Image (cartoon, helix red, strand yellow):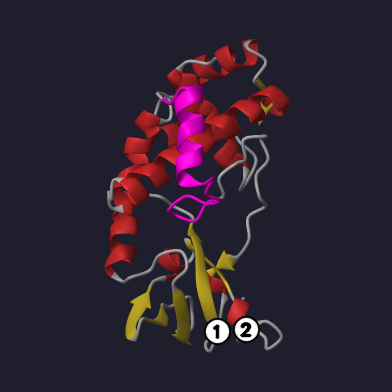
Amino acid sequence: MPSETLEEYLEAIYKLAEHDDVRPSRLADAMAVSAPTVTSALKRLKARGLITRPAGGVELTPAGRTEALSIIRRHRLAERLLVDVLGIPWEDVHEEACRLEHALSPKVQAALETYLENPEVCPHGHPIPSAEGTVAAPTGEPLCDFGAGADVEIVRIDEEAEGLLTYLASLGMYPGTRVKVCDVAPFQGPLMVEVGGSRYALGRDIARKIVVDAPAMAGRGRGRRKQ
């Protein structure tokens, strides 16, 4: 079993690899540590057979991927416990879950899975890996890719930063919330959206982190797409 620190690295490598190739510099930024610290951690992970270093990059081995998914499962189950059972606001649970994920024994984790009825996603909409180590393929597209007239539903929030989640909560924007795109300003300007009868202007940087799907538009198009 890797140490708590190495578990954090495995989790970060897995999440970074979902979007692009993993380089030590990207990992240092994600972990908020220095380059020498990352180099030391990567040597330990490689020695344990959890990563490889192709062309200076970082890739999880099958064993490393299994371990990473186990950590992510514990983390997202912990988030569901904190939100659904303890009533902690969704913007406050990420850091708390980072602490709990290392403390859950297999016995406690199994009991938690049963109590929560094996939820499929975390409070922020990210898929929870199964106990067998599989994970559902991500769905949806960034809200900023949809044009005026699109009627969509939030699937997940791609970034779990407390400030962003607090802001979206103030607008009533959670996974499962319906959003209508009323207008899109040209030249990478903001989107005007309607949520629960109220209208808000969302900057492209925010709209890019809100992943949505358009079930209501099936067979009818999804509005004009912005390139």
Q: Quadrant of residue 62?
A: top right
Q: Which residues are magenta?
A: 104-126
Nearer to us in this view, 47 or 101: 101
The image shows residue 69, relative to residue 175, as above or below, that is above
Q: Could you say which disc has been placed on residue 14 in the image?
A: none
Nearer to us in this view, 87 or 216: 87
Q: Could you say which disc has been placed on residue 217 in the image?
A: 2
Q: Earlier in the sequence, mark 2 or mark 1?
A: 1
Q: Quadrant of the C terminus?
A: bottom right
| Residue 110 is a magenta residue | yes
Of helix, strand and loop, which one carries label 2? Answer: helix
Residue to which mark 1 is pinned = 150
Between circles 2 and 1, the one closer to the viewer is: 2
Which residue corresponds to the image point at 58% horizontal and 14% vertical from the top-left? 43
Q: Quadrant of residue 24?
A: top right
Residue 111 visible in the displayed image: yes
